[in-house]
Amino acid sequence: MVGTSHLPILVVLLPLVTAYITPLLGWIDKRICNPLVVVSMTLAFLASLLLARSVLTGGVISYHMGGFAPPFGIELVVDYFGVYMCIIISFITLMAAIYSREYVAKELHESKTVPYYTLLMLMTGGMMGASVTGDLFNLFVFFEILSISSYALVAITGKKVAIMASYKYLLLGAIATSFTLVGIAYLYILTGTLNMADLSVRLQSVYGVGGSSWTLIAALAFFMVGYCIKAALFPLHTWLPDAHSMAPSSISAVLSGILIKVGALAIIRVLFNIFQPEFVVETIPITSMISWMAAAAIIAGSLFAISQTDIKRMLAYSSVAHIGFIILGIGLATGYGTTGGILHIFNHAMAKGCLFLCAGAIIYKTGIRNIDDLAGLGNKMPFTMAAFTIASLSMIGIPPTAGFVSKFYLGLGALETGTWSGWVFIGTILVGSLLTAVFYMKVINNIYFKEPLLREDVQRDETPLGMLIPILILAGGCVIFGLFPRIPLSLAEPAAKLFLGGI
Amino acid sequence: MEIYSIRPILAVLIPFICALLIAVTGEKNRNLREFWTIAASVLGCMVVISMFPHIYNGGQYIFNIAQIVPGVELGFRVDAFGMFFAFLSSFLWIVTSVYSIGYMRALKEHAQTRYYFCFAACIASAVGIALAGNLLTLFVFYEILTMSAFPLVIHEETSAALEAGKKYLAYTLSGGALVLFGMAMTYTLTGTLTFASHGFLAGHGSAQILRMLFVIFIMGFGVKAAIIPLHSWLPSAMVAPTPVSALLHAVAVVNAGIFGIVRVVTNVYGIGLVADLGFLLPFAIVASITIIFGSIFALAQDNLKRMLAYSTVSQLSYILLGAALLSPSSLSGGVAHIAHQGFMKITLFFCAGAILVQTGKKNMSEMHGIGRRMPLTMIGFTVGALGMIGAPPICGFISKWYLGLGALEAGHPIFIAVLMASTLLNTAYFIPPIYNAFFKEPEGDLIESKEASWWLLGPILLCALISLIFGMVSMVPYTPLQLARTFLGV
């Protein structure tokens, strides 16, 4: 369907335009930045919901920028998956923005306020753009926008460790960027177009031809390595634990909650939108390769997380494991599996977002980062810790939280393959969630059941309301979408079906 | 006949709401907090009882919440067996609440709000398990039960309690993972998870797959049902306060494991299919080994609660033996034993708790002559112990009788020998403490001790009395045995 409304471009422009207005208004008064960003993200969230409604009723929307028809003009394609990502991105960013008002005032120097919000909006604009674009080069550009602003956000505290982490992230990110750029160049040489829909049509004639298919394979390889770095898929995850633990917690929530999933989105786009499913599943079994890597990520990420003492680092390694769950679902390339992977993007965004915000609240109130020192917090900050517990249970996959539903779908997807590797994968999923239980239960144990060193530490001292509300909303979401999973599934299921159409 | 009704969800929600009210009330107003517990337990039990007549006449209540995967709803379907377990849990909750108030206040336990909160959550999940209409719903509540019982297990927060908690979680979460695997497998094979009165797996998948799946289910649920060698969390968990032991051993937790196994045997596989797969003998042998070894381990204990824990391990496998023998009599005896064991074991644990409160003694070797100072408590203990041994007219005898009949019907009289051996072993470890309690002179600080308060004594005597009544009038409608027979259609 060719859209008549301008909603598709609106969701991209809202954060981007806000990014330009923020410094202007911030120059007048720094206190305007936060309300501006919150209002803008609320509007973006509502626009995403409206967009979802029109996609659900009218099918995939194609929006031609400036009215130029593709493949010559730039095309935005809003499919089920794109709008699904838009909703998650705008929602999590909104939560992080509400949380930021009090958090940033204390944790960051005053002079950093304006750059903080500007970069946050740039990054969100990049993510929104990457979700809805139908053009491969556009995807690359939006990826650059979101990556560069995230490098800066990781380093924004100005601490030496944070700058080191950002530098490491930048180096690997730059490698990833150049790899994807080379991939794009190869595809352009082969087909002379960069529009995704057009590419998938023109590539039809390339698959069979002996000589040039090597170029195609090389392109695919460059894309996979590049975007797997962006998605932090083990063993290309090494930048993630540093970057996500050193960034301010509100930014960690966005990075871990949604940014790495945009990498997963790019993998999906390359595998299923540009290449033919038959090609990536059968001719070159790239999906089964990334499934095995994802399985390794689940186990390795969890094992690393168990040995961490810093709470944010532990959460970061847990993200390495959970990006494994998501990519495993994608790689399974079965109805339930891909649905489960896509669903887990949503469920993990909420749970991990909540956890990082809670960790931020702990640091904000007490300055504690070491897991062993958390004793007595259950009495000190009961609501924050209750939210932390619920989100942890969702990460482990205990019903009735949302994490259970995606775990169950992934398990069904693994069995659906009907091969021996499916049995290995479901075993990995179950063992992975048990390992997840090991390190989250350790934290919960310390929070509630360990004797605090000093009695006076246990006075009631709850997180300020402005920070508590987003935490509670996210924790509530973990339970509500566990009981009523049809809500996210109404988009995740058709999205998976669309990608797997050829199988 | 099926009725769409909110009663099942009400029975689950009442304890959940009660848990929230307890959390909100908190330590500020202890009497109000305890009032919520008592009020909700009575109310919940009444809702469950209100479903009795319709269910007893072969009807069902249904309520669905939301779809999770195509063809499987998060929803309830109440049949006689579910009714039976829901009633057991919600009724014993009333008794345990009364006992808890007496016990926790007498010992001035810490973190009582957390205790009552988690207890209510456990009951809600137990009722949810009981009324679940499909395997998925059962699993959801099964895992909630696992998590909400964890703070109770480590209530003391000593290093022993924390170790026990770790062990408990490691065992039960692994068991849960196996059940989840089995459930995913079942769904992949059949596309449904809804319990059917004669099972729904027949005709799906090869015999080999079905055999493997059965073993996975038994192992998964067997962790909570404390089948040897998956039992060792249960004796460790006895460090928890006595009412928690009552919850673990009689009200909810181990019963949930047993309930799951019986559901799998009767409503997922169906008795016929289990027999066709040739599971009668291996399953019965595993149960028999657990019966015998549980009792042998119990013999070696001096700590009263630890001995009772091993006795539970052994008694639970009576139920499994009943399920394994696959004959109508053995199954009805086994199912009835869930309630019988519950009432008798809760009496015994309550007695152990009352002794602990009054004298501070945990070991049987220090309890000589206690029967002269606390006669009513020890009479309750004697009734429970005799019931465990299987002496008429206490309800333990009824279960044993039907199990024996079932062994004959199944054509394997050898299992009667197992029952007899177990009876002897039970006698060997239950009679000496009773003898010492009544026929030896109290020594040391026991001379001064006296009967516990009525908060503790009332529940003991009530449960002992109910054990007696179920034993004497087992042919009257609505007793556990008759409900079991309704469920099995015999």
Image (cartoon, coloured by chain):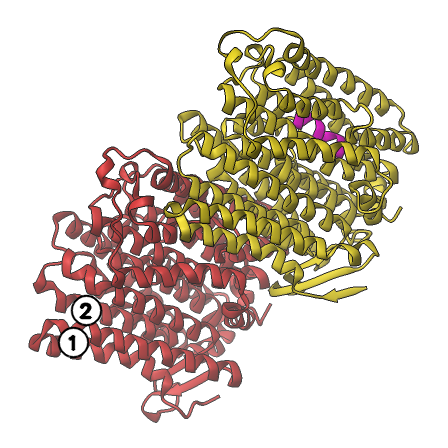
Q: How many neighbours does mark 1 have within 10 angstroms: few (below 14), some (14-19), or many (20 or more)?
A: many
Position of residue B242 relative to residue A22, above or below, is: above
Answer whether labels 2 and 1 touch (C-beta < 8 Å). yes
Chain under callout 2: A
Q: Nearer the viewer, residue B484 or B327?
A: B484
Query: What amino acid is labelled 2 in the image?
Result: Tyr
| Segment colored magenta | B311-320
Q: Nearer the viewer, residue B114 or A370?
A: B114
Query: SS for tag 2?
Result: helix
Query: What amino acid is labelled 1 in the image?
Result: Thr
Our reading of the magenta stretch's main secondary structure is helix
Q: How many neighbours does mark 2 have within 10 angstroms: few (below 14), some (14-19), or many (20 or more)?
A: many
Q: Could you tell me if residue A139 is visible in this image?
A: no
Q: Give the chain coloured red.
A: A
Position of residue A10 relative to residue B67, above or below, is: below
Task: Report the disc number at residue A22.
Answer: 1
Q: CA distance from mark 2 to mark 1?
A: 7 Å
Residue for badge 2? A117
Task: Report the disc number at residue A331.
Answer: none
Quarter of the image where the N terminus of chain B is located: bottom right
- What residue do we see at 73% from left, 61% from top? B61
